[in-house]
Image (spheres, grey):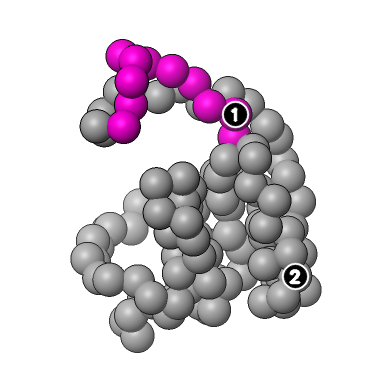
Amino acid sequence: MQDVEVIEHRIDESLPQEIKPQTIIMNPPWGWQKKGADRPLLIAAMNSQADIIHLMHSAKAEHISGLAENHGWASSVLFEADFRLPARYEHHNSRSGKTPVKCWRLVRE
């Protein structure tokens, strides 16, 4: 098992120079409170040196495959499921809930 190094950095369409991932696993903000909040993270992942990206996103998101294709990635939905959410934020109006998600696999074309 390899050591894990945690790096905190603001992401704005590119990763810090010292990050050279082979695989990225991500659950970006979905942009319901702030439209487009996911874009910088998705684009940074697609602009990285990674060979594969695994992504969990809202099942309602319609831009993933087009964005991936525009950045030279092929995309496929591995599965869809309901994701259970405990109330953690001010905008949550019940103690728990669930939301439909799609889990994507992106690979370089």
Q: Quadrant of residue 71?
A: bottom right
Relative to 20, residue 1 above or below: above
Give the numbered dot on residue 69: 2
Relative to 36, residue 77 above or below: above
Q: Nearer the viewer, residue 20 or 99?
A: 99
Residue 46 x, y percent position in the rendering:
57, 72
Badge 2 amino acid:
Glu
In the picture, measured across the screen, residue 11 lies left or right of residue 89, that is right
Q: Is disc 2 placed on a helix, strand or loop? A: helix
The quadrant the C terminus occupies is: bottom right
Give the numbered dot on residue 76: none
Residue count near mark 2 (Cα–Cα under 10 Å), binned few <14, some 14–19, many ≥20: some
Residue 32 x, y percent position in the rendering:
46, 45
The structure residue drawn at horizontal position 49% and vertical position 61%, both measured from the top left corner, is 36
Q: Quadrant of residue 67?
A: bottom right
Q: Is disc 1 placed on a helix, strand or loop? A: strand
Q: Distance between the residues labelled 2 and 1?
A: 23 Å
Q: Mark 1 points at which residue?
A: 100
The structure residue drawn at horizontal position 53% and vertical position 72%, both measured from the top left corner, is 43
Is residue 98 a member of the stretch shown in magenta? Answer: yes
Q: In which quarter of the image is residue 108?
A: bottom right
The structure residue drawn at horizontal position 65% and vertical position 40%, both measured from the top left corner, is 60
In the picture, measured across the screen, residue 88 lies left or right of residue 70, that is left
Badge 1 amino acid:
Pro
Cβ–Cβ under 8 Å for marks 2 and 1: no
Q: Identify the magenta region.
A: 91-101
The structure residue drawn at horizontal position 54% and vertical position 79%, both measured from the top left corner, is 47
Q: Which of marks 2 and 1 is nearer the N terminus?
A: 2
Relative to 82, residue 72 above or below: below
In the picture, measured across the screen, residue 94 lies left or right of residue 24, that is left
Residue most extreme to the bottom: 17
